[in-house]
Image: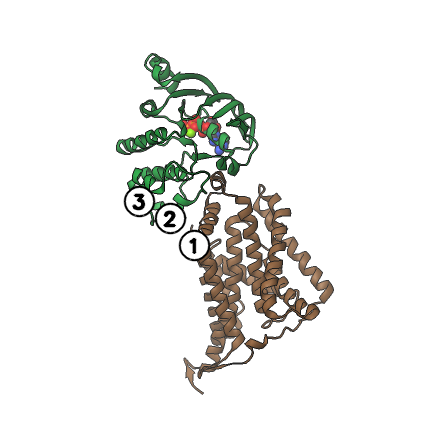
Amino acid sequence: MEELLGIPVQALFGQILLGLINGSFYAILSLGLAIIFGLLNIINFTHGAQYMLGAFLAWMGLSYLGVGYWTALLIAPLLVGLTGIAIERLLLARLANVDHLYGFLLTYGIALVIQGLFRNYYGASALPYPVPAELRGGYDLGFMFLPTYRGWVVAISLAICLATWLLIEKTRLGSHLRAATEKPGLTEAFGINVPLLVTMTYGAGAALAAFAGVLAAPIYSVNPQMGADLIIVVFGVVVIGGMGSILGAIVTGFGLGLIEGLTKVFYAPASDIVIFVIMIVILLVRPAGLFGKA
Amino acid sequence: MLAVRDLHAWYGEQHVLHGVNFEVSTGEIVTLIGRNGAGRSTVLKSIMGLLHRRTGSITLEGREVLGLPSRTVARLGVGYVPEDRGIYTTLTVEENLFLPPEVRKPEFSVRQILEMFPNIRERLASGASKLSGGEQQMLAIGRVLRTGARLLLLDEPTEGLAPVIVEQIGRAVTLLKQAGLTVILVEQNFNFAAAVADRHYVIEQGHVVDMIPNAERDQHAAKLQKYLGI
Ligand SMILES: Nc1ncnc2c1ncn2[C@@H]1O[C@H](COP(=O)(O)OP(=O)(O)OP(=O)(O)O)[C@@H](O)[C@H]1O
Ligand SMILES: [Mg+2]
């Protein structure tokens, strides 16, 4: 077998792909956290639960209603986005004038409630979700085998991240979002409905998490704990990238996924902690994060 | 156009305006003058709805606006240029200019605004954080002109600017007046105020203590010096 740096090529590229897949989820999830943090100034601890909800809605749709993957990919983010809108309007909006710590506690509490309910009904075991028929199989690239579904996840994640970035940086709506992030009071005084922007942003962030959840369903198992496990790593990603930076979230998400994958190749035992080690180093030398403004 | 009656305002527990009364007619330029800390900026913020603890009455063309959210006040045609100019540094110059939604058909087209402030035209694509103080001021004024606001609240537009820039701002304010817009101008530079204004309201410690028509400013010169602390 061919080798590169003493590592079998197949294994190397396999881990790189795995790193990109994980990185895709880190990127979409930290992107959602970043846009929510930018406008609401709260760290959305419900994010992991919203990701889990996306996966569960896909699974429930298929199991109970026969709704397939592609429909779930549209409907689950929509439903979770709507519940996000309700959470923001009914609960978070009331905390706008108190310490942001309360928002953090509230979102954490909501996550525990949602996860607890699902554990109560579905137990803790993994529920299988099939890869959609159109995306089964794979391609032999010569140096490695690429399962179609995994290629799709990386490609659509990149596309979603890019589209979100363009929306925020290059459109009029995006300029309103950035303005409301920088000076909410004055932006309101220019006739822009800032509370509505805040609500829609929270809904959009939640919808992004659910979208990632549906993408994840065929790869990782669907279970009530899936978001809670992942979100801890994603917080590490957000801290490294810099709170609230859109581009930072995307680049750091994919980058850290890759680093994690490569760590698995070169020194597997460290792969679970490498992100947190980087986080500690970043916090020491550049507390605002790689892309954050100090 | 605007009538302010017995306006009180607070920052938290601090009572800053103690019953302010004045009015502004359509097409007038009225200044609020007085010493630092008198409460002039607070009057503008109160009209704009940026201060939440207020009592009294503020009517815009007969309509009570005191309880309205500030976005509604803006949509009724009030354009605000804050003391710190309120330029968004995370936006480009162009994005700043086009940020506020149009509320009425504007008196000035974008082209005319850019002709009024050529410095801005050359820097549309750059980041707004790169602008000089004078350019920021021009952008802040151009930004509210673009919306078609008919009552402009300008808070110290000449503060800290070089004389040539002050002149340029002065020409712009004259154009606004010719176009029939109404302006409330908070101004420390009395020469500038005297060159453009119709009347001056004097504010001291949260009260309007006097009103001096611009035409009579010479006969009240001594009083004015006392009010302005010069
Ligand atoms: N954000 C704030 N919080 C608490 N107090 C404030 C705040 N802004 C202003 N004040 C106080 O309110 C009073 C009036 O301030 P205001 O800004 O209206 O004065 P001003 O007449 O505009 O003077 P200048 O702009 O020259 O300082 C001052 O005593 C000031 O200290
Ligand atoms: Mg002031």
Judging by the rendered image, the residue that carries numbered circle 3 is: B121
Image position, residue B181 (x, y; %): 40, 30
Q: Same chain, marks 1 and 2?
A: no
Judging by the rendered image, the residue that carries numbered circle 2 is: B92
Judging by the rendered image, the residue that carries numbered circle 1 is: A169
Q: Amino acid at mark 2?
A: Thr
Q: Is residue A101 left or right of residue B2?
A: right
Would you identify the image quadrant in which residue B135 lies? top left
| Extreme residue in the bottom direction | A1
Earlier in the chain: of badge 3 and badge 2, it is 2
Q: In the rendered image of this protein, does residue A168 appear above or below residue B73?
A: below
Say which quadrant the C terminus of chain B sits in: top left
Please name the residue shown 48% across and 26% down the image.
B2
Which tint was used for chain A? brown
Q: Marks 3/2: CA distance? A: 12 Å
Q: Marks 3/1: CA distance? A: 21 Å
- SS under mark 1: helix
Which tint was used for chain B? green
Q: From the image, state whether disc 3 or disc 2 is nearer to you.
A: 3
Q: Amino acid at mark 1?
A: Glu
Determine crowd level at label 1: few under 14, some 14-19, many 20+ residues with C-alpha closer than 10 A. some
- SS under mark 3: helix
Determine crowd level at label 3: few under 14, some 14-19, many 20+ residues with C-alpha closer than 10 A. some
Determine crowd level at label 2: few under 14, some 14-19, many 20+ residues with C-alpha closer than 10 A. many
Pinpoint the chain carrying mark 1: A
Q: From the image, state whether disc 3 or disc 1 is nearer to you.
A: 3
Q: Nearer the viewer, residue A94 or B112?
A: B112
Would you identify the image quadrant in which residue B56 lies? top right
Asked whether the viewer can see residue A212, the reply is: yes
Q: Nearer the viewer, residue B23 or B55?
A: B23
> In the image, is the residue at mark 1 within 8 Å of ligand 1 by its beta carbon?
no
